[in-house]
Structure formats: structure tokens, C-alpha cells
Amino acid sequence: MTDKQRDEVRDGMQIHWDVPIEMDDGIVLRADVYRPIEDGNYPVIMSHGVYGKWLHLEDAYPRQWQAMAKHHPDVMAGSTNKYQTWEAVDPEKWVPDGYVCVRVDSRGAGRSPGYMQPWSPRETKDFHDCIEWAGIQPWSNGKVGLCGISYYAMNQWQVAGLQPDHLAAMCAWEGAADFYRDMSFHGGLYNTWLGSWYENSAIPRQHGLGTRGYQSRVNGDWVSGPETMTDEELAANRCDFTQEFSSHPMEGKFWKDRSAEWSNIEVPFLSAGNWGGHGLHLRGNVEAFVRAASRERWLEIHGLEHWTHFYTDYGVGLQKKFFGHFLKGDDTGWKDQAPVQLQIRHVGERFVERAEHEWPLARTSWTRFYLHPEDHSLSREPSSAPKGVTYDAMGDGVTFLTAPFEEDTEITGPSAMKLFVSSETEDADLFVIVRLFTSDLREVVFQGALDPHTPIAHGWLRASHRKLDPTLSLPYRPYHAHDEHQPLSPGEVYEIEVEVLPTCIVIPAGYRIGVSVRGRDYVYPGGAAAGPQSLGNMTFTGVGPYKHTDPLNRPLSKFGGQVTLHMGLERQAHILLPIIPPIEGES
């Protein structure tokens, strides 16, 4: 096959391979269109990105595919699974219901030529134009919906801000929205995942790899073809992604050009997050629900691995219920859908579905737990011991523990940590970890979006980034400006607030909550786990790939030495936790 369009009928669908979509600068992107056998006007489900529209999920991510096949057989049911790709819908499950599925290789990726620059303004404009193209095709009813995970969710927030005329609804499943805070600089700390992702997940799908890249199992042709370029040609045709991102350590135009513009997002949306997605796949989904201008918006948060529920009957059923309402005008029951649908997490990876009306929950009992220096306890009573606790500024820090809870207690929502900090140097990185322990102090962790040993909540802050945005900060969600570097004077005490990302856990009676303040990433005490091939077989130690270990970003001269946490009397260091009173009759 060349780069020319080819049409065929197979597996109950009309399939158009490599359909050309010309951009405003003359570059031609390539899309695959899957549509019903019967001609007509149908709503469109679209994805647009770098992962290669011809690359089968199992060929790219065999461990993930095999785990889903073993533990979630409903993912495989009702489909030949020939057309399953990473983080996009399966057309065999959508076309029979009267949808057209369109997959577009973004500029410079897969079958689309051009300069690869993920999440750039140029790529967002391309996405906008692809939506408008799909909206006027003879097989389209003029309504385009966006649906996908991660990359295919993140760029939904971007393109929605451009307000394409034919964009009618979108389902952003586990995707960041603020490219500075959600993904690249957690609390001002550089996230080294970016380089691994680009090297292992984007570059291997670059257009021009041709015969040196993947071969498609659906049609036998080259995923990143048709031509095969030299290494020099390939390098000239892609950005230095890591350098681009790491060289912008402060909020500014670079990040604003790549992040959601909430005031411009007016399209109806379903935003789905993951309780274990702290480093990438939670904050943006919640911020969207809280801040976007859309009057019709819904939030869902679940557990399990990052990719799983998107493909299960639970996830697909929710997506079809949403899109059936907005793209087809069907009575799917969506008009009665609660604004918030939560999978409440219990120990043992057990989840109980519950409908809510807002976020954070209106009935939240915001409760302060104070840090006590004398015995490292965490108590609802303020500390009366004016004392400091000192730890290695790049070490394991210190942990504070509550007494055993007397009854089952739910915490669901965002948290905030207030600390009083001094450092021997001009800066300090603060890693706040909320943890769960049994009565005999064994830590309980959960399957996170990626890491199988994930604690219940994370927060990060570089002390020199402590400046707050007063218009966006809330008592339970400090919002940092990240627009000014404010170095510390060694030995001086500073009041610092740390955003701790949302969580959900029902704490069993007899269990304890722990809060660790560390000088480096959390490390699960039970040992490491193998990461996916897609990240170069990175070892997971409790935070997945989202590590903050770049020595250039954390030089010893600025971040070494000792840090002291000050407590007691006028310095009541504490964490504010969202305790949810039980609903009468709820077990």
C-alpha cells in the first residue's frame, strides 16, 4: 500500500484507509474512517495523536493487553479485536451502533508527514481543522465527538478552547489539562517522565520510520510509512521535546499556549479520572469539572490501571450513554445522570459506585490533623510543643501517624498541607505523601494508574515556588502561581502551603493515616515492580514513571543539607483532610 486512500468492506464496516485531510499550510494528514455499511449521515467519534492509527494495542503494549484479556474478558467480547489501538475506541464496538470512527495520525506521526511537535499550538490547530473536516463529510451528521485516553484526552482540552463549530461533545478519559502543573513541573519540580515518554512512545511512531518501524497487522503495511527516512532526516523532522519542556521552569506563554483555557471550553463533556493517577491522570480531570465554562459537564473517577476501564463494559457503556444523548439525540437516560459518579475505594481494591452532585462534596467535614513533633503523631488537637523536626533535604524525611481510627472513616476529595519550613540552603523540595497503615503498621497500597504500589495521595512543592495565586487558591486547594522564583534565606522559617491531589479511601476501623514529608520521591517499602515496555522497562518504586530525579533540576548546592519542619504554638503545621460523613443507611 502507498499513501493513497484505499477503501474496502470488512468485518461489517466500510473502511477507508489513509484518507487525506489537507491543513491550512498544505500538509496532508492521514486518517482512517470506519463507518456503517449502509450509507447515511452518522455522528463521528474522533481521535488525533501520535500513537499510530495502524499499530495494534497488543503489538505496542503486550503486557497491558494480556492483563486485560486475563482479568477483564469483557474487553475482548463482542469484537474480533483486529482494530484495537492504544487509548482509542474500538470501531467494532461503535460502528454497529451507528457511529463513524475517525482516527487521525497527527503531524509527523504514523502515516502523516510533517514536523512532529506533540501538544504544540500547531498540532492543536490541526486537530481543530480535522474536526471541521469531519463535520462536513457526506457520511457525517455534523456532530463530532472526541473520545480517548491520556494523549487523546489531553489534546481534547486544548482543541475545545478553539471552539470548533462541529465539536458537539467530548469524553476526556484520564488526561492532564494544565501542562505545567499536571504533567511537567509538579509543584515546580521537573518530572523526568517526559523524556522517557517521548523516546519510547512517540519517536518509535514517527512518520518516516517506514520499514524500520512497526508493521501493521490489520493491513500488512508500515505503521510509520510509506517512506523510510535516514536518522538525520528523522531528527530534523521532530522537536527536541525534552529540551523544550525542561527549559521553561516557570509558568508563562509556552505553557499557556499548551494548556486548557477553561473560560473557552463550553462544549458538553464527560471527564473521567483515576484515583491512582497522581502524576498525570487525575488533577486535570477534576480541574476541568470545577473550572470549565461548560454548563453541561460530568465527572467520573474510578480505580484500576490507567487504561483498563476505558475498554471495559463499564467504561464503554458510560461513553455510549453520554454520546448517544449528545450526538444522536437518543433517550439513553443521560438526562438523569448525576453530575458526579465516584467509584468509592475500599481496602482490597474494592469499589462501590456512588452518585454525587458536586465536587468537592458539599457535606465534606474539612478536618485538620496537626503534626506533633514530640512523638511524630498526627492529631485533631493542636500541638503545644514548640519544636522542630530536622531531616536530610534529599532523604526519606519524617512520617506522622494518627491513632487507630475508631470506626470506618471515608476521606474523599482534595487535601492541603500547611508547613513551617526552614532550610540550610536557598531552596527545598517538599514531597508530601498521604499513606494508609494497618493496626500493626503495615502499609496498604493500591493499584495506581501505572504503579501497582501506589499510596493514597501525593503533593509536591518547591519552596521557592510557594507564592500563591490569591484568585484561585482555596483553603482545601492552594493554587501556586509558578511565575516567580523566591529563594529562601538559610535558617529563616517560611509558611508554605502544599496542594495534595484528590483521593478516596474508606479507612477501616483500627487503621491509621500517615503523612510523610520527604526530600525525595516516595519509595514503596515492599520492593520495586517492573514497568511497561513502553517506558523502556523502567522500574516502578511507588510513583510509577513520574520521578523527580534530574540532577540538573535538583543540584546539591541548592537542595542538599538539612530541612527543618517547625511545629507548635503559633506554627500549627497540619494537613486538612476531606472526611465524608456517612449517608444514613449506607454500609
Image (tube, rainbow, N blue to C red):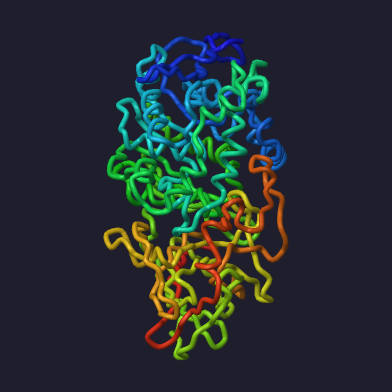
Between 15 and 328, the residue placed more toward the observer is: 15
Asked whether residue 565 appears in the rendered view, the answer is yes
Q: Residue at x 47, y 29 (%)?
A: 48
Which corner quadrant holds the N terminus? top right
- Estimate the x, y position of residue 482 in percent, counting from the top left: 37, 58
Which corner quadrant holds the C terminus? bottom right
- Estimate the x, y position of residue 115 in percent, counting from the top left: 48, 27
Q: Please tell me in which quadrant of the rendered image residue 143 appears.
A: top left
Between 399 and 546, the residue placed more toward the observer is: 546
Asked whether residue 355 appears in the rendered view, the answer is no
How many numbered circles are shown?
0
Q: Is residue 452 above or below residue 112?
A: below
Q: Residue at x 60, y 42 (%)?
A: 308
Q: Residue at x 39, y 59 (%)?
A: 360
Q: Please tell me in which quadrant of the rendered image residue 196 appears.
A: top right
Q: Residue at x 37, y 48 (%)?
A: 289
Between 341 and 497, the residue placed more toward the observer is: 497
Left or right placement of residue 356 versus residue 240 in this view: left
Left or right placement of residue 56 versus residue 148 in this view: right
- Estimate the x, y position of residue 113 in percent, counting from the top left: 50, 21
